[in-house]
Image (cartoon, rainbow, N blue to C red):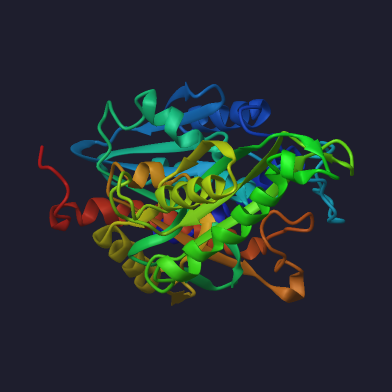
Amino acid sequence: MEIAKLLAEFADEVIELRRDFHRHPELGLEEHRTSEKVAAYLKNCGLEVCRMNKTGVVGLLRGDQPGPTLLLRADMDALPITEENDVPYKSINPGVMHACGHDAHTAMLLVAAKILTSLNQPLPGSIKFVFEPNEENVGALAMIEEGLLENPRVDGCLGLHIWTPLQSGQIGITAGPVMAGMEHFKLVVKGRGGHTASPQSAIDPIITAAGIIQGVQSIQTREIDVLKEPAIIMFGRIQGGTASNVIPDCVTLEGTLRYLFEGDPQSESNPKKRFERVVSHICGAHRAEYELSFLYGHPTLVNHREMAALVNTVAARELNPAPEIVSFVSLAGEDFSEFAARVPAAFYFLGTGNSAKQTDFPHHHPRFNIDESVLASGVAMHVRGALSFFKNADKLNFIKRR
């Protein structure tokens, strides 16, 4: 009853916070106003607060009794998009917008932190409330390298994502691979320039690039089981040439690899390895050379089965009204995978799609918005998920007894 009362008490506050963050979006590692507000809020809750990765914030709730440590995570960064929504809380920062739900994530976790610190019951362990900057560019890794998972050592992680492809009232949770590993690549195809009237005396990087764009598509459809480990290879940028009658020296291609590959990163089955193999052979066939760089990325997000089962049970038994629980997998990238690669974790999706409220636009769209009625469910999942983690700690096989 105490939790239900607190959830109702703070239902308006989570919406106010979300709208404030939405009105003042900030790009990755520029979340200065956001992080100041987050840090002040956590300190007012009585938490120990520290900064990590420039604008990241971590609040630590030390339990009354010894026990495991749970990490709850929200991301804070916005996107370089001009908002087209006509709402009172529209972005006031030109060319910057919360078009992925990170404003909602931050608001929900803040209110969850307030509730969890307000409960009149002992906490058998500790909670790290992590507000991650620069998620769109793998901000999690820098926090991990700065010691986020230590002192106290983290035993389990939970995170959620607002998701417009799911309807409001749905929660998506799946064990195993749930979001794609992702790599941003830059490929420079090097030929030999010349006159378009004499292509035989040049090495044309444009036709080589065309062969690569076509050739690597066979990886997705001819080498990989699309039902087990789907992969997507997309080219987002092609640049080369200075004039219509000049064969250039080189062509630059940029894009992304996305995949649900779980195996050894050094295996030849890794989509990255497959990609370079095809590039190498096509360049060889055209007498061209190449330079391939993987700029940044993260592994496949794999949900731990016990942690996923915990989330499923909480959603099914402890939310009111009860949501529709669905199995959901996406080839979008999510750097929560860096936590899940090191600590048993579960990442799940909170549906917010509602056509009547015009909250069914895709993520990263200039009219992206959310159904704010689901925010209370997100707070409840954080709170009840954390308490369930500690209540069932003795049954979780991966927790090392202290």
Q: Position of residue 392 (x, y in %)?
A: 20, 57
Is 243 on the left or on the right of 73, as rendered? right
Task: Pick whichever, 275 or 44, lies toward us.
Answer: 275
- The quarter holding residue 78 reads top right
Q: Position of residue 22 (x, y in %)?
A: 72, 45
Q: Position of residue 281 (x, y in %)?
A: 49, 49
Q: Residue furthest left?
A: 401
Is 61 on the left or on the right of 241, as rendered? left
- The quarter holding residue 250 reads top right
Q: Position of residue 374 (x, y in %)?
A: 59, 64
Q: Note whether 76 is above or below 353 in the view shown.
A: above
Q: Residue at x 49, y 41 (%)?
A: 297
Whether residue 8 can be seen here: no
Is 191 on the left or on the right of 66, as rendered? right
- The quarter holding residue 395 reads bottom left
Task: Pick whichever, 24 or 236, lies toward us.
Answer: 236
Q: How many marks?
A: 0
Whether residue 359 can be seen here: yes
Q: Quadrant of the C terminus?
A: top left
Q: Quadrant of the N terminus?
A: bottom left
Is 374 on the left or on the right of 143, as rendered? right
Q: Note whether 127 is above or below 33 in the view shown.
A: below
Q: Residue at x 31, y 44 (%)?
A: 266
Q: Residue at x 41, y 74 (%)?
A: 227
